[in-house]
Amino acid sequence: MISTVKIVFFGTGGSWPSPERNLPSVGIQLDREVLLFDVGEGTQRQMMFTSISFMKISKIFITHFHGDHFLGLAGLIQTMVLNERKEKLEIYGPEDSIKQISNFLNLGYYSLSFPISIREIKSGETIDFGDYIVSAVKTIHPVTNLAYSIKEKDKKRISQELMEKYSLNSRDVDTIIKKGFIAKNDAKITIDDISDGTRVGRKIVYTGDTAPCQCIVDLAKNAKYLIHESTVDSSLEEKANEYGHSSSRQAAEIAKKADAENLLLTHISPRYRSSDLKILEEEAKKIFKNTILAKDLMEMLVPI
């Protein structure tokens, strides 16, 4: 069972870095484990200004192979090597990931100190990681881009009152969770005997790059947080859509259709400076009130 879920933005820009924003990279902390989604240039340095250690990353998910979303991967891995990492690193991505990543990591002169596995994910595929599952769908973009859903599994909600009824302590409950039951006072007590309902798992969706599409509406259904690209404001959305991108207004429409709880806007075009950003958030909030324009180094705890 996962206790703490945290979202950390290491880069919220797109295309090329600006003085205000680094390139795309989002960390999702699940207790002591860290999942990284995209690795823009300089991601490992950005992480040094947050509560997340790059040495805690267990899995990296690449949305696609446009440079702003993956060119920081080699630097991150070399930094891990120089810090004497030994633990295995898993990398996931769309079709052609094995070739693209293997070639990229063979550049330069350094030796790996830890094993790396690379797995290609197909659109519609779901991977079970125990306490959570990751699902992927192909979006609308000039090259194959995968959007990812991270879903904590639903869990039985344990009732303190029912625990007392059966004279159980926390260690007994752990035994029931692991074995399925516990024998006590000539009775076989299961999880259903001490549960008063189900705790619905938290869901976070990260789109990578995409024009507006029904695939994101379906993937983000009832998500706690939808992290959606919002490259431009509505005056430029027609051109953005041609290149496989969305406006903040369109991101808000997607969040509303998906019945998401919150929308986080990211992948902001470098054409926008601090004084110009208000329009992006305002246009989205007219459609979807619970909208936040993400900033580099922003950290958010995801409530149960």
Image (cartoon, grey):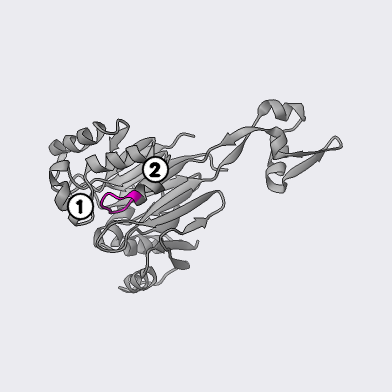
Q: What stretch of residues is rendered in magenta?
A: 207-214
Q: Residues within 10 Å of mark 2 (few under 14, many from 20)?
A: many
Left or right: 302 as drawn, with respect to 9: right
Q: Secondary structure at mark 2?
A: strand
The residue that label 1 is drawn on is 241
Does residue 111 lie above or below 291 as drawn?
below
Left or right: 291 as drawn, with respect to 91: left
The answer to if 204 sits in the magenta stretch is: no
Does residue 258 lie above or below 136 as drawn?
above
Image quadrant assignment for residue 78: bottom left
Name which of mark 1 and mark 2 comes first in the sequence: 2
Does residue 56 lie above or below 105 as drawn?
above
What residue is shown at x 44% (from left), y 66% (from top)? 119
Q: Where in the figure is residue 79, as x and y percent of width and height?
A: 36, 60
Name the dominant secondary structure of the magenta segment. Answer: loop
Q: Residues within 10 Å of mark 1 (few under 14, many from 20)?
A: some
The answer to if 212 sits in the magenta stretch is: yes
Q: Where in the figure is residue 36, as x and y percent of width and height?
A: 39, 53
Query: Hey, what amino acid is under mark 2?
Result: Ile
Image quadrant assignment for residue 172: top right
What residue is shown at x 49% (from left), y 63% (from top)? 88
| Circles 1 and 2: CB atoms closer than 8 Å | no
Residue at the right extreme of this rendering:
186
The residue that label 2 is drawn on is 7
Question: Number of numbered discs present?
Answer: 2
Query: Hey, what amino acid is under mark 1?
Result: Asn
What residue is shown at x 14% (from left), y 52% (from top)? 239
Q: How far apart are the alpha carbons under marks 1 and 2? A: 27 Å
Q: Secondary structure at mark 1?
A: helix
